[in-house]
Amino acid sequence: MGLSLRQHPFAFLRQDLARRQIATCADVRAARDGTWLTVAGLVLVRQMPASASGVMIFATIEDETGHANLIIWPSLFERQRRTVLSSSAVACRGKVQREGEVIHVVASNLIDLTHLLRQVGQQEENLRMPNTAADMVRSSGGPDSRIPRTRDIPEPHLRVDNGISVKSRNFR
């Protein structure tokens, strides 16, 4: 797909997210207590601790700038159960809660952004990387035509056309 470890999947989506006024996880860390904002990221972890005094789920999301912790109360969980449990990427509208070094976003609404991950692999203009020495053939100086691009591989089971799939870790 042209992706490397140099870029987070959300880096490819940032322009679109910025147009929607969706903050980065770094913006959450810089926000004052009580600020309302919308933040988005890959869902890394969902936790449903028994000892969380009424909190249904703690979730951690990550974008290209870092991570943010979400608190999802039982009432929101009941309204948006499918989004909470099945989204690989999510936008969260909520209120920043700061207590010392601990920062959370108390969620009031969630939006499933998993479909955006599928689009990343199809945004070829965002995935082009400059050629490096390893991509060149000494005789011509151009891209090595002997190495097929992923989308040119004839075996369908070896192709990667469905975008990015992210598995979240869920704990109880």
Image (tube, rainbow, N blue to C red):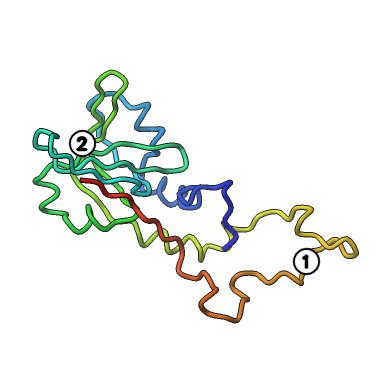
Q: Secondary structure at mark 1?
A: loop
Above or below, 4 relative to 118: above
- Mark whose residue sits in front, 2 or 1: 1
Where residue 114 appears, as percent x and y from the top left, is 35, 59
Please identify the quarter of the rendering in which residue 72 is found: top left
Who is closer to the viewer here, 53 or 92? 53
Whole-angstrom CA distance, mark 2 to mark 1, is 50 Å
Q: How many marks?
A: 2
The residue depicted at 52 percent of the width and 69 percent of the height is 160
Q: Residue furthest top?
A: 100
Amino acid type at image mark 2: Val
| Quarter that holds the C terminus | top left
Where residue 121 appears, as percent x and y from the top left, is 51, 63
Amino acid type at image mark 1: Asp
Who is closer to the viewer here, 79 or 169? 169
Where residue 105 appears, as percent x and y from the top left, is 25, 35
Q: Secondary structure at mark 2?
A: strand
The residue depicted at 68 percent of the width and 72 percent of the height is 148
Residue on which disc 1 sits: 144
Residue on which disc 2 sits: 106
The residue depicted at 25 percent of the width and 46 percent of the height is 171
Neighbours of disc 2 within 10 Å: few (<14), some (14-19), many (20+): many
